[in-house]
Each structure stands twice: as structure tokens, then as C-alpha cells.
Amino acid sequence: MNTMAKFLTMPRKEFAWYVTGLCDGEAWFQVRPKTCIDKRYDKVSKGFSVLFGMQVREDDKELLEMLNIYFGIGSISTRHRKGKILGEHQYSIYGAKNAQVVIKHFDKYPLLGKKRRDYEAYKAIVNRLYSPETDGLPNDWEGHLQDYLEIVEMCDDLRLGRLPKGTPLTIEELLKQKGGSTDLYLPQIINLLVQTGELMI
């Protein structure tokens, strides 16, 4: 019996715990600010990219297909790296609204390893970004600058929580190893806001 066939015959509660175990080892939780200077209005364009994802080798694609069926949302993409025999598949759930499905699962079937800290930070940010009553804060964050900066700082905390302790490397060097920007988000964004006059310091 192949992996998909086992999934289709497995009791849902049993498979839910299997999903949690799989995610404890392979998934990630990411929230990062999306910012740039909008020259039309001379202001900083503000937003956030919210992502729950998992990446596996090409021959493990069935695992991602099972996640897609289980959560009922998300997408699977493929990429091939130069010099690699097998390609890679990535399962992604984007957005604070879609993240409600992720939160519902992990609140009921909690992570047990170090990744639980990442999840709790991700959940706290998502809860600031989205509520069913308002369907999220305004995209331009007009009148919500303090909220915006607080969430940016929470994004930095999420990134820093993944870094190993007791290392002689600087924060910049550690962030470089993890990919993405080598600088903390908050100082970069404050600098942009000062440039446009939206923030006086």
C-alpha cells in the first residue's frame, strides 16, 4: 500500500497527529514585512507576507499532496536546482486569513519540539493581522502606524527565535545563514518612514 492509500484509510485524528509530527521536523512559519517607497504618494507602502510551508524532495511529493487534501487549501510548486538530480516541491499556505486553518490544526494537535516557539510567534502575528469581524486591518495602515511597527518587531522576534544560541557569530551573520535579509526589519522600515516624513524621530 502506497503512502497516499494509507492516508486515505487512516482515521482522521491519527493522521492529524501524523501531520503535526511531520511539520515538527519539516515545516516552517514565516511572516515578513513587504515595504517599499511608493513614489506616487511619497509614502511607504506597507504590508505583510504570511507563509506556512514545507519543502521536500521530488520523490516525496505525495506527502505534500496529503497536506493539501488535509488542510483543504494551499498550493504546491516545483523547482529544479542546478546540479541537483531530483527537483524539490514546496507546499505553501499564504495569507493571514488562510492561516486560520493552520492555527486551528496546531491548537488542537500541538507541536512538541522547538518549532512550537515559531508557531506561537506566527500565531501571535496572525492574530494581530486578521480578525473575522474586520477581515484584517487596512492595507495602507492609515492611522495604524504604531500597530504596524509593533508587528514588524514581532516579525524580527520570529526570525531571531530560530537562531542557535551560544554562537560567536553576529546576528547579521546568523540571519545570512538562514536566508533573506541580513538586517533586522524594524530599523530598515523606520529609516524608510523617516525618509518619507511619516515618522519623526
Image (cartoon, rainbow, N blue to C red):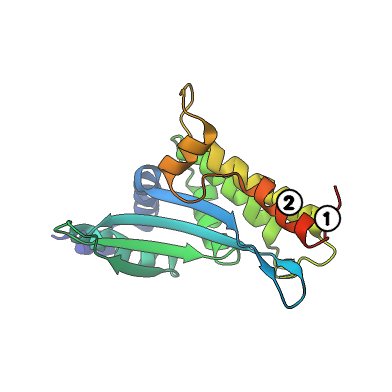
Q: What residue is rendered at 67% in x and 47% in y? A: 186
Q: What residue is rendered at 60% in x and 66% in y? A: 97
Q: Residues within 10 Å of mark 1 (few under 14, many from 20)?
A: few
Q: Say above or below: 21 vs 137.
A: above
Secondary structure beneath disc 1?
loop
**In the picture provided, is 176 more to the left or to the right than 183?**
left
- Give residue 63's position: percent from left, percent from top: 28, 59
Is residue 72 something that shows in the picture?
A: yes
Secondary structure beneath disc 2?
helix
Q: Residues within 10 Å of mark 2 (few under 14, many from 20)?
A: some
Badge 2 is on which residue?
Answer: 190
Q: Are marks 2 and 1 in contact (CB under 8 Å)?
A: yes
- Give residue 119's position: percent from left, percent from top: 53, 46
Name the amino acid, label 2. Answer: Ile
Badge 1 is on which residue?
Answer: 199
Name the amino acid, label 1. Answer: Leu
Q: Residue furthest bottom?
A: 40
Q: What residue is rendered at 43% in x and 48% in y? A: 179
Q: Say above or below: 142 vs 128.
A: below
- Give residue 20's position: percent from left, percent from top: 40, 47
| Camera-nearest residue between 194 and 34 | 194
- Using the image, tell me which numbered label, if any, was put on residue 7: none
Q: CA distance from mark 2 to mark 1?
A: 7 Å
Is residue 162 something that shows in the picture?
A: no
| Camera-nearest residue between 130 and 4 | 130
- Give residue 29's position: percent from left, percent from top: 49, 51
Q: Quadrant of residue 194?
A: bottom right
Q: What residue is rendered at 34% in x and 49% in y? A: 18
- The first of marks 2 and 1 along the sequence is 2
